[in-house]
Image (spheres, rainbow, N blue to C red):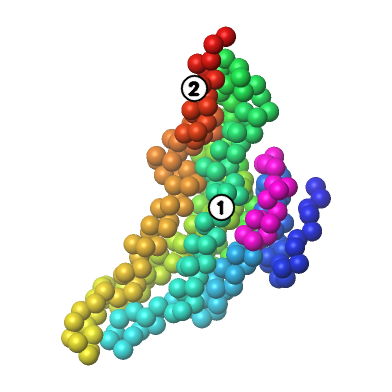
């Protein structure tokens, strides 16, 4: 396949590799991305920015210093990485780069290329989702040691799902990075005798250390990413329906109900 030339603002090699990685995944999935090249380029730039923060944290070797009260002091780089990760996550659904979003695009494509006005407009989709899981290529960036271990651990867990993860490589990379972030909080607290609160020297009042405070926020982001990629029990059931075209959106359900109710 011929991959379009990336825009000039993608200056780094990694950004251009992400550009090619996304387009290759979308093309192999049979998705039409021609009008979405600017979105893909902006996403590639966001991924490059995010990974620059990951590299800086990995080079430093820690996310948390100790503050003057013996509590955890999160580094600026760590906070920047989490914000950048969140920005990448926001763009994945519109790009068809999560499992649930890809299933929706695939089902809509099948409706468009089939007979939408058949007696059973979903019948043509019954064979979708029956094959084994399709796993993505490894992301086009250097995984940290902890991320690589998680990436390898994920593969056998996903292999038996029967879902298509081929466009979800960036999403799975985000999940690995978020889990590393979540574990860093736990590791700091374990290394500091389970400390959750510290005492401010100037006021004598206790406050929650950042490692404890951040943990549920990171868990919330992980929970959202798992849901978007069919990796919770509820999302798994929804994805099985979605992969067969049974559930797409409220608007499409309304349209199909109208079609089925039309007079012959």
Q: Residues within 10 Å of mark 1 (few under 14, many from 20)?
A: many
Residue 142 appears anywhere in the view? no
Q: Is residue 104 left or right of residue 12?
A: left
The quadrant in which the C terminus is found is: top right
Circle 1: element type:
helix
Circle 2: element type:
helix
Q: Name the residue located 39 percent from the left edge and 39 percent from the top edge.
A: 234
Residue 76 appears anywhere in the view? yes
Report which residue position mark 2 lands on: 257
Of 137 and 12, which appears nearest the observer? 12
> Up-down: is 38 above or below 183?
above
> Up-down: is 134 above or below 129?
below
Q: Residues within 10 Å of mark 2 (few under 14, many from 20)?
A: few
Residue 104 percent location from the top left of the image: 56, 38
Task: Judge whether residue 97 is colored magenta.
Answer: no
Q: Name the residue located 68 percent from the left edge and 67 percent from the top edge.
A: 14
Span highlighted in magenta in the image: 29-44
The majority secondary structure of the magenta stretch comes to helix
Q: Are marks 1 and 2 in contact (CB under 8 Å)?
A: no
Q: Name the residue located 54 percent from the left edge and 33 percent from the top edge.
A: 243
Residue 19 percent location from the top left of the image: 70, 58
Query: Label 1 vs label 2: CA separation?
Result: 29 Å
Q: Name the residue located 72 percent from the left edge and 63 percent from the top edge.
A: 16
Location of residue 68 (image quadrant):
bottom left
Report which residue position mark 1 lands on: 92
Number of the front mark, 1 or 2: 2
Residue 71 percent location from the top left of the image: 30, 81
> Up-down: is 219 above or below 13?
above
- Farthest residue to the left: give it: 204
Q: Total marks drawn? A: 2
């Amino acid at each position: 396949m011929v991959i379009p030339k990336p825009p000039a603002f993608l200056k780094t090699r990694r950004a251009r590799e992400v550009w090619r990685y996304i387009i290759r995944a979308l093309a192999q999935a049979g998705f039409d991305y021609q009008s979405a090249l600017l979105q893909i380029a902006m996403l590639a730039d966001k991924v490059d920015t995010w990974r620059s923060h990951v590299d800086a944290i990995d080079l430093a070797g820690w996310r948390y210093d100790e503050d003057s009260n013996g509590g955890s002091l999160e580094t600026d780089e760590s906070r920047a990485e989490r914000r950048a990760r969140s920005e990448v996550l926001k763009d994945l659904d519109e790009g068809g780069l999560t499992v649930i979003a890809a299933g929706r695009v695939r089902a809509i494509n099948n409706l468009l290329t089939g007979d939408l006005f058949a007696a059973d407009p979903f019948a043509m989709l019954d064979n979708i989702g029956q094959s084994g899981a399709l796993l993505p290529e490894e992301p086009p960036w250097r995984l940290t040691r902890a991320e690589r271990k998680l990436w390898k651990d994920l593969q056998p867990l996903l292999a038996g799902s029967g879902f298509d993860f081929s466009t979800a490589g960036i999403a799975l990379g985000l999940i690995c990075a978020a889990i590393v972030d979540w574990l860093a909080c736990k590791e700091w607290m374990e290394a500091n005798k389970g400390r959750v609160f510290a005492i401010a020297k100037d006021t004598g009042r206790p406050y929650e250390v950042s490692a404890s405070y951040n943990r549920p926020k990171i868990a919330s982001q992980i929970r959202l990413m798992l849901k978007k990629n069919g990796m919770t029990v509820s999302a798994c059931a929804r994805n099985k329906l979605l992969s067969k075209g049974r559930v797409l959106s409220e608007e499409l359900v309304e349209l199909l109900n109208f079609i089925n109710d039309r007079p012959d």
